[in-house]
Image (cartoon, rainbow, N blue to C red):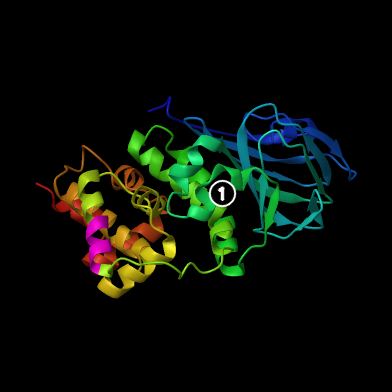
Amino acid sequence: MGEHLSVSTGELDGFEGLHHAVKGSHVDVMQLERGKLRGTLSHVGIGDFSLSIGTFNVGVRTQRIATDDKLIIGMLLGARSRVTHWAFDMQPADVLVIPPAVEHDGVFQSASAYAAIRFDLAEVPAIFGGEPRLSDAETWQEKNHFRANDAIGMTAADRLPQIVSYLAQHPGALSDSSAEFWKRTIIDCVTATVVTSLPPDDFGHLPSAMKLVRDVEDYLHAAGTRPVHVSEICAMLRLSRRSLHRAFHEVFGMGPVTFLRHKRLCAIHSILRESRPGDTTVTEVALQQGFGELGRFSQYYRLLFGEYPSQTLGYAV
């Protein structure tokens, strides 16, 4: 598993550390504000996919000329002053698209924090298969800026550093399928702003809600016990998020994200019931099923089953 998932985090001691602000890329950096640049830089690698998160305390100017065919999608996590990329004025949680082989020019006038994911254009159809407007690689060939939805964007901006922290604490605890789930979760955080920027897709034929839900459940059954992200379902079944949401609300009275969370909680309950306390831990099982914030996971679990996960594990014989 160690070859599949890698996590590194370190302290910045000078602007030179930002030369590798995005894993796999080289960035030219010039310091703009006076003072010793301090900060942190973290990288998560899952196969050829990477997430980079950086924070720094003084203003810098960044320039990058791509030398490969990787797509970079960035999010501004926070900023004390003005941030511009090309001609785009950025606000916290805004998303920036940097196409392959396109020069990037950014100015951070003061302390800032950012996140950036980097992956092959060839992965776009699999990631956005349920959104035809996004699944075409040509869509990502032009630089672009997406203004964040206040609620969704800031939730994602807050969650990304937490995910890095979770994975850094348990670098060897994930199976390949769990690592793939976390990869989709990271991509979902960064690109949620892009998806919510699309106009409604109410045109066209919508399959009956019950049939659509049955198709999803058949897919989940075939997946077995591994965690399945909602973006995987949309991509594999060629469904938009809105179509999926409407169908699940009609059938179950809850959205697909909540439904999938309940399914993962049920899988954890069964695993804990069948395990011995000395053979596994609640933390290991939760991470395998895509739960990183263990306090919130425990609340979800207790609300659904009326007991804490540690109690379920303790009941195992």
Is 134 in front, or is 231?
134
Identify the magenta region: 210-216
- The amino acid type, in three-letter code, at marker 1 is Pro
Position of residue 81 measured from the top left corner of the image (x, y, whole percent): 81, 58
- 73 in magenta: no
Crowding around mark 1 (Cα neighbors within 10 Å: few <14, some 14 to 19, many 20+) is some
| Residue under label 1 | 161
Residue under the image location 69 percent in, 36 percent down: 21
Is 188 in front, or is 210?
210
Q: Residue 309's image quarter?
A: bottom left
Position of residue 310 measured from the top left corner of the image (x, y, whole percent): 25, 53
Q: Residue 246's image quarter?
A: bottom left
Along the horizontal axis of the image, is 190 left or right of 243? right
Residue under the image location 69 percent in, 59 percent down: 92
Q: Is residue 307 visible?
A: no
Along the horizontal axis of the image, is 50 left or right of 34? left
- Residue 181's place in the image compared with 304, above or below, is above
Residue under the image location 58 percent in, 59 percent down: 193
Residue under the image location 69 percent in, 51 percent down: 144
- 213 in magenta: yes
Q: Residue 105's image quarter?
A: top right
Position of residue 233 measured from the top left corner of the image (x, y, whole percent): 35, 52
Residue situated furthest top in the rendering = 3
Is 202 in front, or is 295?
202
The kind of secondary structure element at disc 1 is helix
Residue situated furthest left in the rendering = 317
Is 253 in front, or is 299?
253
Q: Main secondary structure of the magenta part?
A: helix
Residue situated furthest front in the rendering = 204
- Residue 158's place in the image compared with 284, above or below, is below
